Image: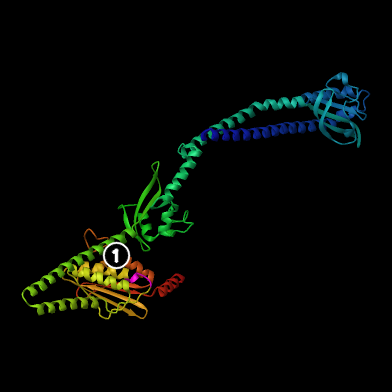
């Protein structure tokens, strides 16, 4: 059976069962109401007959039935009861609908009324089964007889059957309305589940979960109320979302940059955002179902590794160019040596060789004074060669001092600042680097003699995608990474005017352990 058929049959069965029970209860209530109505009428008739002076006085007559029978019949016909029977103290009838029964003993037990009690119940007499009331007749405090007033059970059933058509009309009307409602509900549910069967829905759910959690991209769905409706495994890993993120407001679990994208509803296409120290491409699309806006879908692609590879590739390309330039310079020096030998001046050739070797050794030594961190030393060598190739002089403070701290944070900060400084200085420019220590805190200072950074832009340059440079390789992410590292370490970063007219970046990096303690104290506040 299809889902529609099962829904319809189930609801119709519920409607029929409910209406059947309600109809039966209503029928019983109607029967009880009819019986109570007759009971009240019979009690009233019996008590009025038992207290009627003419009836009481007739007991002293030689033939009481001659007086009582006409009165009883008039009252019976006027009240609509089946019979009014009056008896003496022994149960002998003085009245009866059938005059032939007068003078006979009553067919049912008269002990209850003759003992002074009122009896109400169903008994079978000469006229058949009837609902009857028996009351005593008193004279001067003594029971002198009884009055029995009754209505046949067949009469009660006839009255009930008279009301039954109206009750059936209401029951059938309710059944029809319930059936129509069941049809509407099953059609509504069927449309809401896109006319799919339960097996298809279950299969679709399994496929959806497999696809969502198998995607290499992160996906977060936010409903129209701003609550997280879904987050796949990649999104949870990228954004470090809590296990109970689904159902919580997006503002509580998402980064500020992502909240801004959701608020903008995807205007502007893909955006480069920095979440923690991860570089992500984020895109927000509206979720529309049947023309109704039901929320937003946030798509995330991790580009941290791609960015690192591109940066490494840029470094390798720059280093290759530097080596090519050195090879070219070395070939020129060999030509000079060869020419001096051909001219018969070996002493001058030896002097030229000594001068070239000494200057190279001195250059390598002076580029890394006091720097004991091998990663920083290697970075300075590579950046010096790259800057030289681009016509930029890279000057390192002779008192530079950098010790290993177990992280690559100094390399990240120094590498990005040097890249920006070399780009800003341009050919013929100068970049100065100072690496110092203030107690356990490392202080990195990089300045250039380029155009500098306007005061109005000194806060914006740390935002993702913002750059004062132009060109194909401009991404606007380096300074954002620097600020993320500085924030994580609990340090500071500021931009100043350099003495030569360019920009000077000053960064302080506390040791990792002190930085973690500072963050814990800040969170405690």
Above-or-below relation of 12 to 261: above
Instruction: Say which quarter of the image contains residue 113.
Output: top right
- Residue in front for this viewpoint, 419 or 137: 419
Q: Position of residue 167 (x, y in %)?
A: 64, 29
Above-or-below relation of 220 to 398: above
- Residue in front for this viewpoint, 465 or 396: 396
Q: How is the image coloured?
A: rainbow
* Circle 1 SS class: helix
Magenta stretch containing residue 408, yes or no? yes
Q: How many marks?
A: 1
Magenta span main SS: loop
Left or right for 462, reference 174: left
Q: Quadrant of the N terminus?
A: top right
State which region is magenta. 406-410
- Residue in front for this viewpoint, 394 or 26: 394
Q: Position of residue 352 (x, y in %)?
A: 13, 77
Q: Position of residue 159 (x, y in %)?
A: 71, 26
Instruction: Say which quarter of the image contains residue 321.
Output: bottom left
Magenta stretch containing residue 273, yes or no? no
Left or right for 68, reference 153: right
Above-or-below relation of 186 to 437: above
Instruction: Say which quarter of the image contains residue 70.
Output: top right
Left or right for 521, reference 468: right
Residue 390 in view here: no
Q: Quadrant of the C terminus?
A: bottom left
Residue 320 in view here: yes
Q: Position of residue 489 (x, y in %)?
A: 38, 71
State the residue lying farthest toward the left: 343
Disc 1: CA contacts within 10 A as few (<14), some (14-19) or many (>=20): many
Left or right for 349, reference 308: left
- Write down the residue under mark 1: 478
| Residue shown at 45% from the left, 38% from the top | 194
């Amino acid at each position: 059976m299809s889902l529609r058929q099962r829904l319809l049959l189930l609801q119709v069965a519920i409607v029929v069962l409910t209406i059947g029970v309600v109809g039966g209860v209503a029928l019983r209530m109607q029967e009880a109401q009819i019986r109570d109505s007759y009971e009240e009428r019979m009690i009233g008739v019996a008590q009025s007959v038992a207290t009627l002076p003419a009836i009481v006085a007739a007991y002293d007559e030689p033939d009481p039935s001659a007086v009582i029978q006409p009165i009883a019949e008039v009252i019976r016909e006027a009240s609509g009861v089946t019979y009014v029977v009056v008896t003496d103290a022994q149960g002998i009838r003085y009245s009866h609908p059938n005059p032939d029964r007068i003078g006979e003993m009553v067919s049912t037990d008269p002990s209850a009324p003759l003992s002074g009690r009122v009896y109400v119940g169903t008994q079978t007499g000469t006229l058949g089964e009837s609902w009857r009331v028996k009351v005593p007749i008193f004279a001067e405090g003594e029971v002198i007889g009884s009055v029995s007033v009754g209505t046949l059970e067949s009469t009660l059933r006839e009255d009930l059957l008279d009301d039954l058509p109206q009750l059936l009309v209401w029951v059938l009307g309710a059944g029809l309305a319930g059936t129509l409602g069941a049809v509407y509900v099953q059609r509504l549910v069927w449309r809401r589940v896109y006319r799919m069967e339960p097996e298809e829905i279950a299969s679709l759910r399994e496929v959806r979960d497999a696809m969502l959690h198998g995607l290499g991209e992160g996906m977060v769905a936010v409903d129209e109320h701003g609550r997280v409706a879904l987050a796949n495994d990649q999104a949870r890993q990228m954004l470090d979302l809590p296990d109970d993120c689904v159902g919580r407001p997006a503002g509580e679990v998402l980064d500020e940059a992502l909240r801004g994208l959701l608020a903008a509803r995807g205007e502007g296409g893909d955006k480069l955002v920095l979440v923690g120290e991860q570089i992500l491409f984020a895109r927000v699309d509206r979720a529309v179902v049947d023309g109704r806006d039901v929320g937003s879908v946030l798509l995330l692609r991790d580009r941290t590794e791609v960015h690192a590879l591109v940066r490494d590739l840029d470094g390798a390309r720059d280093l290759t160019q530097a080596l090519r330039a050195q090879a070219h310079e070395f070939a020129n020096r060999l030509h000079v040596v060869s020419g001096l030998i051909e001219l018969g001046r070996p002493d001058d050739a030896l002097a030229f060789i000594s001068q070239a070797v000494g200057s190279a050794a001195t250059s390598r030594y002076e580029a890394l004074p006091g720097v004991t961190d091998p990663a920083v030393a290697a970075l300075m060598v590579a950046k010096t060669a790259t800057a030289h190739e681009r016509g930029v002089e890279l000057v390192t403070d002779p008192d530079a001092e950098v010790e290993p701290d177990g992280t690559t944070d100094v390399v990240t900060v120094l590498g990005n600042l040097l890249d920006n400084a070399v780009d800003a200085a341009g050919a013929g420019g100068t970049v100065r680097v100072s690496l110092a220590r203030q107690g356990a805190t490392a202080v990195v200072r990089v300045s250039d003699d380029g155009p500098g950074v306007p005061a109005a832009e000194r806060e914006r340059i740390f935002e993702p995608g913002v750059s004062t440079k132009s060109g194909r390789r401009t991404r606007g992410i380096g300074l954002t990474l620097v600020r993320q590292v500085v924030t994580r370490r609990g340090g500071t970063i500021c931009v100043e005017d350099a003495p030569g007219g360019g920009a000077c970046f000053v960064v302080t990096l506390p040791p990792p352990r002190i930085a973690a303690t500072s963050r814990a104290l800040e969170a405690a506040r």
